[in-house]
Image: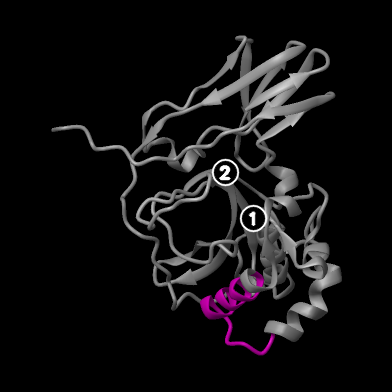
Amino acid sequence: MTYELAQVTPIILMLNVHASRVGDLTQPDAVATTPPVPMSGYHDGFGNWCTRMVAPAGRFTIRTDGIIRDSGEWETPDVGAREVAIPDLTPETLVFLLGSRYCETDLLSETAWKLFGQLPPGWARVQAICDYVHDHITFGYEHSRATRTAAEAFKERRGVCRDYAHLALTFCRCLNIPARYCTGYISDIGLPPPHAPQDFAAWIEVFLEGQSGGRWHVFDPRNNDPRIGRILIARGRDAADVPLSLTFGQHTLAGFQVTVDEVSAPAT
């Protein structure tokens, strides 16, 4: 990411792989900048790793890369997973039942119950929500707007991956299903070319109970199909909790590139 900064500017980044995948890194994903600046890190309230820095005025580039070990297997659904009654939910899941900056559960609750309330609870109902959102919203980068909420995405029927995620997780929360927002990398590995230009991506995780107990399950209302090599960066209530870069000052994004490629395993 390359910025043109009008003045000395504090920046907070969320660009490192999430702690749940750090053990899979075979090459560290250290952040580097041009020109170099001092950096420090901390964990936010959701356990995401954040990097602080102060950038000089002028042209400033931020870069990170790494190599991560992945199973290489397609994501598989747990179609028998069940919803968990509110009294049985673990305390840390409860915040993901609430409305948040981009997810107006109060505005969409009646709509959610009308559309999905009569469906069998569990995995099938969450997948029905994702199917609906996938078909309801038209994707286009020209439709991107940083202030669009779930209710606005529902009304306008257009947006980018974050809008799909916000609307789907809002519907889930309205139906008393904990759901949280995720950001990271989604690869095109295993998909037929031509591949579209790559970008950071947003998806959701939903808390359901399967044979191994209650856990968070991945759903992707934007792509609505399994992937190989999904790499998590951060989780939160919605996009307001997990900005890839938070820039405290006037700036222009002059360049932006994301690349996720498969590399051959080293010889053993």
Tag 2 and tag 1, C-beta contact below 8 Å: yes
Task: Tell which of 227 and 198 is nearer to you.
Answer: 198
Residue drawn at (62%, 69%), measured in percent from left and top? 134
| Residue 169 locus on image (x, y percent) | 67, 64
| Rendered view: 117 above or below 63 | below
Q: Residue furthest front?
A: 194
Q: In this view, does 151 lie to the left or right of 253?
A: right
Magenta-tinted stretch: 117-133
Q: Residue 178 carries which label?
A: none
Q: What element carries label 2?
A: loop
What residue is drawn where x is 64% and y is 62%? 179
Query: Quick check: 1 left or right of 225?
Result: right
Residue 59 spot, x, y in % from top left: 70, 15
Give the mark, 2 or 1, whose residue is nearer the N terminus: 1
The colouring scheme, among rainbow, by chain, secondary structure or one colour, is: one colour
Specify the quadrant that holds the C terminus.
top left
Q: Please name the amino acid that badge 1 sits on.
A: Cys
Residue that carries the numbered disc 2 in the rendered image: 199
Expressed as whole percent of the image width and height from the top left, the position of residue 177 reads 65, 70
Is 85 located above or below residue 261 in the figure?
below
What's the amino acid at mark 2? Asp
Check disc 1 and report the residue beneath it.
161
Q: Nearer the viewer, residue 31 or 263?
A: 263
Q: Does 98 lie within the magenta span?
A: no
The CA distance from mark 2 to mark 1 is 10 Å
Q: Can residue 88 be seen in this view?
A: yes
Picture mark count? 2
Mark 1 lies on a secondary structure that is helix
Of 78 and 243, nearer the camera is: 243
The image shows residue 163 at horizontal and vertical percentages of: 71, 58
